[in-house]
Amino acid sequence: MQKIINSQVLVTGGAGFIGSNLCETLLAQGNEVVCLDNFATGKKENIVHLLDNKHFRLIEGDICSSEDCKKAVQQIDYVLHQAALGSVPRSIKNPMATNEVNVGGFVNILHASAEAKVKRFVYASSSSVYGDYPHLPKIEHLTGNLLSPYAVSKYANELYAQVFSTLYPIQCIGLRYFNVYGKNQHPEGEYSAVIPRFIRQLIRNESPVMFGNGEQSRDFTYIEDVIQANQLAALASSEKAVNQVYNVAYSGRTSLNELYKLLVELLANFDEKITRIVPTYAATRAGDVKHSFASIEKARELLGYQPTHSIAQGLKNTIDWYWQVLK
Ligand SMILES: NC(=O)c1ccc[n+]([C@@H]2O[C@H](COP(=O)([O-])OP(=O)(O)OC[C@H]3O[C@@H](n4cnc5c(N)ncnc54)[C@H](O)[C@@H]3O)[C@@H](O)[C@H]2O)c1
């Protein structure tokens, strides 16, 4: 697999879940890494072990500030743009904040990157752009009606990237992540994702809340596969591969009930009592899609993407990490 080496890489949102994992891998591969983050949702503890590394530079700043963006893109080869306000429910509660950061901030960093003539701008899009499109698996060019302000913001990113690539000397690749999980994902708070939330509640012997009947399905994607996709997107050299969007997933279907069972099985190795916990079912949440399952043929063909972690493999690593951190 192609890896980014000997380069200057900007990771926006580098103190967040995905960003901090990217920073760590890129440093281990011998790059100079700049992290731009305002700690809106990111955590110092995700990057504290990187702060003494002389190849790592933290810029505590905001993608909504042109000044901060200009500073961050100086001498940069590749931008891996992760900074955003995640979560569908958050965007329904406060659509203005989601728009300001995810759209306004996106245009800011994209513009600064174009001006600085970076080699490639890779950005995090989302499976939410498929909205209510009913057919599975999801294929990049077939999308439905969007279901949340968050989805609108991610779709706007794709439109801006496309327009910028025709107007400015910049090459962009959008990665539509599908339910990413792994170490450093924040397990607390009302906007936490389902895997860290379930793990936290089970470890604390609480009953996890399942929205809906648990039969909704997701294509859970392990963090290492997301890191792989970012590197391939940054380095892809064929003309056909650039200025495109790609699904980034494992390409598997797991219902929330199946996920729950898997988590209980794995966690029972640490604490047998967990097998006796039963989930609490609650009303479906507004804006949630029913099923999410990706075709990854496009990324396979044009980027050489090959996911390596099934849900069972990825969860095992993830649980080992959470058990140490939360116990
Ligand atoms: N985790 C997933 O399953 C998933 C799925 C689809 C898309 N995504 C996208 O991937 C990206 C990373 O997600 P994540 O799960 O790591 O989320 P995260 O919340 O852990 O990370 C986002 C980071 O962006 C930073 N940030 C937010 N606003 C900022 C601003 N104005 N200026 C600078 N930094 C700012 C936060 O402090 C945080 O460190 C996001 O764009 C998200 O929308 C994630």
Image (cartoon, grey):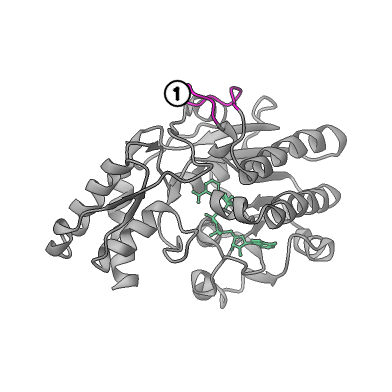
Name the residue furthest bottom: 52
Image-quarter location of ligand 1: bottom right
Task: Say whether residue 114 is magenta.
Answer: no
- Residue 216, given in percent of the width and then of the height, sits at 37, 37
Residue 146 lies, with reference to residue 45, above or below; the image says above
Magenta segment range?
132-144
Q: Along the horizontal axis of the image, is 2 left or right of 199?
A: right
Q: Is residue 33 visible?
A: yes
Residue 316 lies, with reference to residue 125, above or below; the image says below
Instruction: Give the main secondary structure of the magenta stretch.
Output: loop
- Residue 285, given in percent of the width and then of the height, sits at 47, 46
In which quadrant of the rendered view does residue 270 lie? Answer: bottom left
| Image quarter of the C terminus | bottom left
In which quadrant of the rendered view does residue 268 lie? Answer: bottom left
Q: Nearer the viewer, residue 281 or 142?
A: 281
Identify the residue position indicated by label 1 in the image.
136
Q: Amino acid at mark 1?
A: Leu
Q: Is mark 1 within 8 Å of ligand 1?
A: no
Task: Say whether residue 139 is magenta.
Answer: yes
The total of numbered circles placed on residues is: 1
In which quadrant of the rendered view does residue 61 lie? Answer: bottom right
Residue at (70% x, 58% y) in the render:
97
